[in-house]
Amino acid sequence: MAFFLLFSTCSFSVEKHFCGTHLVDTAIFSKVKKCEMEKPSKTPMKKTCCKDEIEIVKGQDELKLNTFENLNFSHQCIIVAYAYYYSNLFESLPKQIIPHKDYSPPNLIRDIQVLDRVYLI
């Protein structure tokens, strides 16, 4: 939901470069690459067949912000009940005593299972 809110408020532009009727390049956050026909020539009066199109996508400017005081009483009760239920949802477990916490296992000199060729599958 937060992603859609962020995306709906962002504005961006889409630039397209056409050479004749063929689309050469499209760019969203950078400048479009021009074709060879668009490069500056020695004669300034020469017309080119290239054109640039810029499409601007505007985001939403006005957002409706509600405060807790602007809500009616029934909506306030629902929000308070939900917050109370959610806060009591995560209760910690009681501390469990682990009797063998400080016990270290004996040192193995030989692996008996490998010596006896007994393998657990």
Image (cartoon, helix red, strand yellow):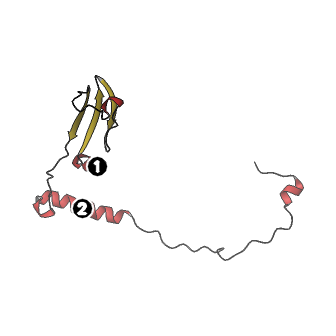
Q: Which residue carries the number 1 mark? A: 1
Residue at image position (21%, 60%) is: 79
Disc 1 versus disc 2: nearer the observer: 1
- Assign a secondary structure to mark 1: loop
Disc 1 crowd rating (10 Å Cα; few below 14, some 14-19, many 20+) is few
Report the front residue among 90 and 50: 50
Q: Find residue 49 and report its horizontal and vertical position in percent.
A: 26, 25
Amino acid type, mark 1: Met
The correct choice, above or below, for 6 with respect to 13 in the image is below
Q: Residue furthest top?
A: 21
Q: Are marks 1 and 2 in contact (CB under 8 Å)?
A: no
Viewer-proximal residue, 61 or 69?
A: 61
Please state if 97 lies on the left or on the right of 88 as rendered: right
| Left or right placement of residue 111 versus residue 20 in this view | right
Q: Element under label 2?
A: helix
The residue lying at 22 percent from left, 49 percent from top is 9
Per the rendering, the mark at residue 81 is 2
